[in-house]
Image (spheres, rainbow, N blue to C red):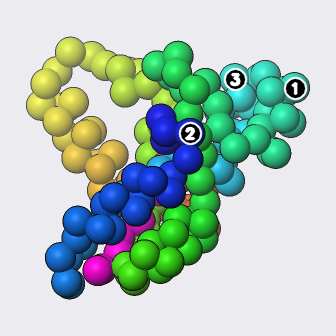
Amino acid sequence: MYLSEPAPMIEALCACTVVDGIVSVMALNAATLAVRPALERRWDDARAAFHARGECGVLGLDTRADTVEELSGLFADRGVRPLAWYGVWLFTDWMTLDDGDDGDDEDDEDELTRIAEVELEAGRRDPYRRLSRVFHLVGRG
């Protein structure tokens, strides 16, 4: 997401993949760019994000957003068969993990386990995975 175009990186990854090897890429989801500004009540930014292909991320750097379909096409054009894709950070990207922190490490560990279980399940199924902040695309060479 920090490169101006995805094709050179995808080409390099696919070129160094052995037969039956796996290519794994995570990308910012272009379909969800309006969510963060809307949750922050930045309505003009949210409206503009419906047509955006990137944003200034939480690190203060410009980022590029992609779609599953576009990156799947780049994989296929380079001889890598897209196998599956998953949503990443559906719920947790929109909140801070220290909300409600009472300092009890055991409770925190239990909560992180529950968060991971919910995120994993959401990332596997629609409509949730389509709403995820990031997606993970997996292909086989």
Spatial CA distance of label 3 from label 2 is 26 Å
Spatial CA distance of label 3 from label 1 is 11 Å
Which type of secondary structure does the marked residue at label 3 adopt?
A: loop
Mark nearer the N terminus (3 vs 2): 2
Q: Which of the numbered marks, if any, corresponds to residue 40?
A: 3
Spatial CA distance of label 1 from label 2 is 24 Å
Q: In this picture, which residue range is highlighted in magenta? A: 135-141
Expressed as whole percent of the image width and height from the top left, the position of residue 109 reads 17, 36
Q: Residue at x 22, y 70 (%)?
A: 17
Mark nearer the N terminus (1 vs 2): 2
Q: Residue at x 64, y 31 (%)?
A: 55
**Residue 139 sits inside the magenta stretch:** yes
- Left or right: 128, with 88 as reference point: right
Q: Amino acid at mark 1?
A: Asp
Q: Which of the numbered marks, if any, corresponds to residue 4?
A: 2
Residue occupied by mark 1 = 44
